Image (tube, helix red, strand yellow):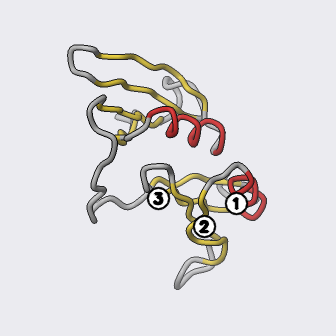
Amino acid sequence: MRLLHTMLRVGDLEKSLAFYCEVLGMKLLRQKDYPGGKFTNAFVGYGDEADHSVLELTHNWDTDSYDLGDAYGHIALGVDDIYSTCEAIRQQGGKVTREPGPMKHGTTVIAFVEDPDGYKVELIEGRG
């Protein structure tokens, strides 16, 4: 077995694609409309689905926002230089919600950014 993808429901697919592709540097791997179900699936990631886990962004055409609830945690991305990554995200209009620094009760350097729907994305230095 292997992890194939994680699905997030998004309110504005174009904003989400801009964030994940332009701000975080992922690639749009495939996208398909399902008119009968009134939704679109877009798959984004850092490599081909045959070799990498990816994100499925699902946009339900009649829903523009979601209550994220309190069970969702975050997506984690490894980065080489967390400080320059956060600055690049900020320069592209991304929202850094926790500045880079050691995690609480540890030494791993982390930061958090937020996507257009409010989903948290953790950046972890040294795992890029």
Q: Residue at x 71, y 62 (%)?
A: 82
Q: Determine which residue is flagged by label 2.
A: 111
Dot 3: element:
strand
Report helix, strand or loop for mark 1: helix
What amino acid type is highlighted by mark number 2? Ala
**Residue at 51% of width from left, 31% of height from top?**
44
Q: CA distance from mark 1 to mark 2?
A: 8 Å
> Upstream in the sequence, badge 2 or badge 3?
2
**For the residue marked with disc 3, what is the amino acid?**
Lys
Q: Find disc 3 in the rendering and name its residue.
A: 120
C-alpha span from label 2 to label 3? 10 Å
**Amino acid under label 1?**
Cys
Q: Is residue 97 left or right of residue 33?
A: right
Question: Label 1: how many residues lie within 10 Å, few (<14), some (14-19) or many (20+)?
Answer: many
Q: Secondary structure at mark 2?
A: strand
Q: Tag 3: Cα neighbours inside 10 Å, few (<14), some, or many (≥20)?
A: some
- Mark 1 / mark 3, whichever is N-terminal: 1
The percent position of residue 30, horizontal first and vertical second, equals 49, 19
Tag 1–tag 3 contact (CB < 8 Å): no
Residue beneath the point at 61% across and 63% down: 96
The part of the image, by quadrant, that contains residue 48 is: top right
The label shown at residue 86 is 1
Badge 1 vs badge 2, beta-carbon distance below 8 Å: yes
- Spatial CA span between label 1 and label 3: 14 Å
**Mark before the other along the chain sequence, 1 or 2:** 1
Image check: 117 left or right of 84?
left
Residue 62 located left or right of residue 40 = left
